[in-house]
Amino acid sequence: MAKKNMSPVKVPMPEQAPDVRNKNFSEVALGYTAEMAIEEAGRCLNCKHRPCVGGCPVNVPIPDFIAKVAEGDFDAAYDIITSENALPAICGRVCPQENQCEGQCVRGIKGEPVAIGRLERFVADYHMAHAEARKTEIEKNGKKVAVVGSGPSGITCAGELIKKGYDVTVFEALHKPGGVLSYGIPEFRLPKDLVAREIQTVQDLGVDIETNVIVGRSVTIDELMEDGYDAVFVGSGAGLPRFLGIPGENLLGVVSANEFLTRVNLMKGYKFPEVATPIKVGKRVAVVGAGNVAMDAARTAKRLGAEEVYIVYRRSEEEAPARLEELHHAKEEGIIFRFLNNPAALIGDDKGWVKSMEIVKQELGEPDASGRRRPVPIEGSNYTIDVETVVIAIGQSPNPLIRQTTPGLDTQKWGGIIVNEETMESSKENVYAGGDTVTGAATVILAMGAGKKAAAAIDAKLSGK
C-alpha cells in the first residue's frame, strides 16, 4: 500500500536560480524525480467526491492517476491521464492549476493543495524518456473532418476524432504546428522539442497536418466542404493583437507581444546572428500589460540582454491577470513593476525610433464591466521613462480572415465565432469552433476542453448517435 504523506506543503520542485536563469532560455522548473513524485502523490486523500476532476476542463481522472504514481506505476498513470488529455507534458507546465484542479483540492483548505500539475508533468516526461512507441489500430468509418489550426483546441479535436475512426486533416497557417504552444510561450516555460513530441503522438495516430495553409486565403471553409469533408472544426486562435491607440504607437521599436514572441520562439531570434532573425531590445524595455503574455515578453526581453525591463500596468497587482507563479518568477528575475501606471504617449528620436514613454499614474475607482475596479488617471502625475523597445501585451482578437471569407458564419462584434455552447456548432451547419477564436484569448486547457467537446458533438452528429 502506498505511503501517506500528511505534510501541509507540496514537495518543492527544483528550479534554476533566478540570477542564472534570467540569462538563458533553458527551462526554469526542473521537474520532480521519481522519489519526489511518489512522495507528493502520497499527499492525495483520494476523496470520494473527487472535486479536482470537476475543476479540470478535460475531466482527467486525477485521483486515479495519482494513486498509480504513489505505487510507482508511472506507465499506468500515463494511460489514465491520456485517456482524457492528449497533451499532458504541456498541460503540466502551462495550465493554471491553482484556479482549476488544485483550486478544488481538499488538501488546500488547511495547507497547500496536492501538486497535480507537477505530477502530471512528471508522468508525461517519464513516459517520453522511457516508454516505447505503441502501434494503435483504429477502424476507419469512411468520414473525414478538416481542422483549422494546430493549436491546443485543434490538436485536441483532431486527436479525439482520429480515435473514433475519422480521417482528419489539420490545416496550419504557419510553417510549424502547435499554434500558440510553438510561437507564443517561451522556451523557458515550454520547451519546443517537447511540444513537437506531444504533437507527434497525435500524428502517430494518423492525423495529417498540412502547414503553410491559410484557411480563408489558400482555401476557404466552403471549398473544404466541397472537397468532401463532412465537418470542419475552426480552432484558429486569437492572433490579432490589440494596441493602445496612443500617440507614437507607430514608432520603430514598438511591437506587439505576438510579433515579439513569435520572432524569438518560432523564428529563433534569440540565436541571432547565428540564425538570421534579428530582434532588437536595447538596454531598456517597457512591456504594457500584466497577463501571462506580458510576463513572457518581459522575461524574454531580460534574457535577450535588456538591463532594465518594466511591466507597465494601469491597475494594481491584485487585478493583474497573470498567474501568481509567473508574477513571482518575473519579480525574482529582476523585472521592474510599475502598477497603477498607464502609458499616455510614446516619444521618438529624429530617426523615428522610440526613445521614451510618457506615463500617467492611476488610482482605482468603481468596478467596471469586468468586475475589476476601473483605473482613473491622477491629474498632473505625468512622468517619462527612457525606453528603446516597447512591447504591447494587452490582449488579442481572432483574425478576421475566416469570418470575412465564410458566408453564413455569425460572429461577435469583436470577432469571436458564435457557437452553441453544448455542441460548439456555429451558425453554419457542420462547421464547429472552439478555443480562443470563440472566447478570445484564454488558457490552453480551456481551448483543449472546447476541442474535446466539439469532437464529441461532431461524432454524435455524423454517426447519427
Image (cartoon, rainbow, N blue to C red):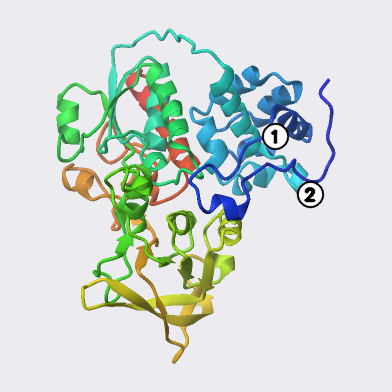
State the residue lying farthest toward the front. Answer: 274
**Tag 1: Cα neighbours inside 10 Å, few (<14), some, or many (≥20)?**
some
Distance from Cα at disc 1 to Cα at disc 2: 18 Å
Q: Amino acid at mark 2?
A: Gly
Q: Nearer the viewer, residue 319 or 433?
A: 319
Please say if 295 is above or below 179: below
The mark found on residue 50 in the picture is: 1
Q: Quadrant of residue 180?
A: top left
Please say if 267 is above or below 369: above
The label nearer to you, 1 versus 2, is 2
Residue plotted at (71% across, 31% down): 37
Q: Nearer the viewer, residue 35 or 69?
A: 35
Residue plotted at (75% across, 21% down): 71
Residue plotted at (69% across, 40% down): 115
Quarter of the image with the C terminus in it: top left
Q: Amino acid at mark 1?
A: Arg
Mark 1 secondary-structure assignment: loop
* Residue 430 placement (x, y as % from top left): 28, 31
Q: State the count of labels.
A: 2
* Residue 277 placement (x, y as % from top left): 28, 48
Badge 1 or badge 2: first in the primary sequence:
1
Mark 2 secondary-structure assignment: loop
Q: Is residue 152 visible?
A: yes
**Tag 2: Cα neighbours inside 10 Å, few (<14), some, or many (≥20)?**
few
Q: Nearer the viewer, residue 394 or 20?
A: 20
Q: Quadrant of residue 422?
A: top left
State the residue lying farthest toward the bottom. Answer: 380
Q: Are marks 1 and 2 in contact (CB under 8 Å)?
A: no
Residue plotted at (44% across, 64% down): 289
Q: Nearer the viewer, residue 395 or 196?
A: 196
Quarter of the image with the N terminus in it: top right
Disc 2: which residue: 111
